Image (cartoon, helix red, strand yellow):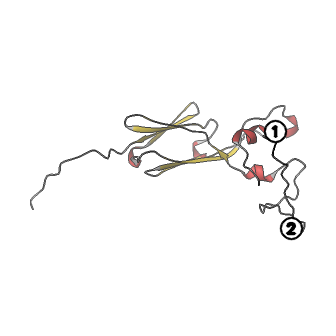
Amino acid sequence: MIKKRSFLERLTGSIKLEDEEEPIEIAVNPINKLNLQGRDIEGLADGESKWEEEQEAELSLDVYQTENEIIVQTMIAGVHPDNLSINITRDSISIKGKREENQSIDKENYFVQELYWGTFSRSISLPEEVNLEEAEAIEKHGLLIIKLPKIDKNRETKLKVKSI
């Protein structure tokens, strides 16, 4: 069984080894050169994995509440606002984006390469319903802060009956 590598493992290129775990083998179909996931593996150099290039990173979040709001915070440094998408429903939030590398440097010229470049996303269910019309997103020094006002289910208003 193939386990999904953590964000840190993908970011650093490390692999978590466990004593009981046996090496993973991927069967290759010689007729069409596809691995078990159906991805083309022809033309890849040794140690290079097309699967890792296509995989989306999971965005780290902090979610907390105040008396009137649910606050979602995440680091999006280096992401252009046009490459960021935030979708909110009354009970969930989904953030997707892409961090593009501005420089094209040959891999052999790197001594250390730990920054993540590529697509990322995260979807979570919110603990309470929120008011979509009053939600706001603010970016400050690479920190994205999304303020989601809670819906007050206990609020009452009195209606006056108009006679026509």
Quadrant position of residue 35: bottom right
Q: Is residue 16 above or below residue 91?
A: above
Residue at point 73% right, 45% down?
Answer: 5
Question: Amino acid type of disc 2?
Answer: Asn
Q: Quadrant of the C terminus?
A: bottom left
Question: Amino acid type of disc 1?
Answer: Ile
For label 1, the SS is: loop
For label 2, the SS is: loop
User: Could you give the CA–CA distance between mark 2 and mark 1, rounded to whole angstroms?
Assistant: 33 Å
Q: Is residue 61 above or below residue 157?
A: above
Tell me residue 93's x, y (percent): 51, 48
Q: Residues within 10 Å of mark 1 (few under 14, many from 20)?
A: few
Residue at point 18% right, 48% down?
Answer: 158
Tell me residue 122's x, y (percent): 59, 47
Q: Quadrant of the N terminus?
A: bottom right
Give whichever of discs 2 and 1 has the lower sequence position: 2
Tell me residue 12's x, y (percent): 77, 37
Q: Horizontally, is 119 left or right of 74 in the view?
A: right
Identify which residue, 111 or 68, lies in the foreground.
68
Quadrant position of residue 150: top left
Residue that mark 2 sits on: 32
Q: Residues within 10 Å of mark 2 (few under 14, many from 20)?
A: few
Residue that mark 1 sits on: 105
Q: Horizontally, is 18 left or right of 82 in the view?
A: right
Q: Evaluate if marks 2 and 1 touch, with contact meaning CB atoms under 8 Å apart.
A: no
Tell me residue 153's x, y (percent): 32, 47
Residue at point 86% right, 60% down?
Answer: 27
The furthest residue to the left: 163
Residue 81's label in the rendered image is none
Q: Horizontally, is 143 left or right of 27 in the view?
A: left
